[in-house]
Image (cartoon, rainbow, N blue to C red):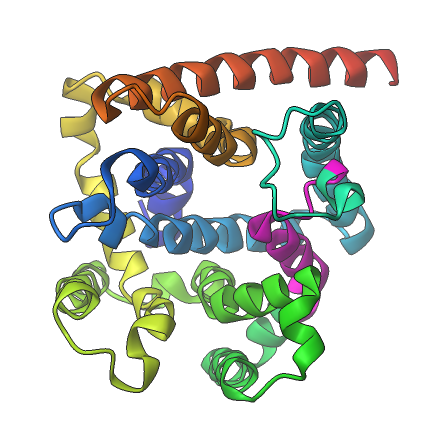
Amino acid sequence: MSNKEIISYNRTLIMGIAMFSIMMFHQMWFFGHGIDNLFYYYGSWGVDFFLFVSGFGIAHSLKKHKVITFYNNRIKRIVPYCLVFGVARALLYHNGIHGFVPKWYPHIGLVACCLDLWYIEAIIFYYLVSPVMNRGLQKMGGYFLVLIILVSLLYSWLPKPDFFTHWHLLKRFAWAVTRLPVFAFGLYMYHYMDNYPQKQLKYSGLLLIFLAMIQVKAPDWIGLKTYISFFVCFSVPGICMAIADSRPVIERLKLVPLLYWLGKNSLLIYLCHEFVYWSIFNHLTMLPGLVSFPLAITIVYILVTITNKVVNNLLYRFR
């Protein structure tokens, strides 16, 4: 198989591993932020892997469909789940049950659309600009990718007006721009991945070892840790190839069904898991982490299953 075919074949598996990593990153609610909590230091990199694979998949979708069809498919993909889960959270909040909405967050209208979640805001922004970025990467290749990285860095470094820090959407938009190069790199690699030898791609994964040491041990030179995702993105193809090579081991361990479930339900899991963690941590404080964390995972599974059924029934009725 070509490099592109390897990533395409293992895409859901990689997304499942990325989603598991993100879920384990947020377990800091139960097990703390200490240096011995490795998932806290490295789990957030699951977002970078997820964005890379998302960009890779979106480039494939743009190749198959016209832009209007692409946008229509994206709307069908995220809007029903965001509305069902967001409206449920807003109703709970309105009726005095604040666990699923942080107390500091006043914009209940945005909660009802799940736009209080930075990733949803980010992915909508990425969907909107994907056709333009994809076209630029096809025409200009690495030059356009460097341009995207420079624009993202400049936006991150430039001082912002005061209202940026007070208006929630703009504050979270800055986070989206910081992660934009990883997503763009996924678009880029869809078109050019087969130009790189597999051995070279796998060696790129070694960069992650160096970045791992910086993440925990190194002083934060000029905010280096803040922008570490700029560097992580270049190691992602190598790690994805390593995951693909590890597939026989994953199959022997019978983990493929679990990881596929996580990958296929990644949007819903993202929508609900952190709020379940937050609610249990704040309201069941007497429980030790070894009890409350498995309880949270169980509730996430139940919520994802129920929401899937609700959304599927609604979509069936309104066809």
Q: Is residue 13 above or below residue 163?
A: above
Q: Residue at the spot x=60%, y=62% of the render? A: 172
Q: How many marks?
A: 0
Identify the magenta region.
112-132
Residue 122 in the image, given as x and y percentages of width and height: 61, 57
Visible residue check, residue 135: no
Q: Residue at the spot x=47%, y=83% of the render? A: 146
Closer to the camera in the image, 207 or 153: 153
Visible residue check, residue 306: yes
Closer to the camera in the image, 235 or 86: 86
Is 213 situated left or right of 29 in this image? left
Residue 68 in the image, given as x and y percentages of width and height: 82, 51
Closer to the camera in the image, 27 or 203: 27
Residue 200 in the image, given as x and y percentages of width and height: 19, 66
Residue 211 in the image, given as x and y percentages of width and height: 20, 67
Name the image quarter holding the N terminus. top left
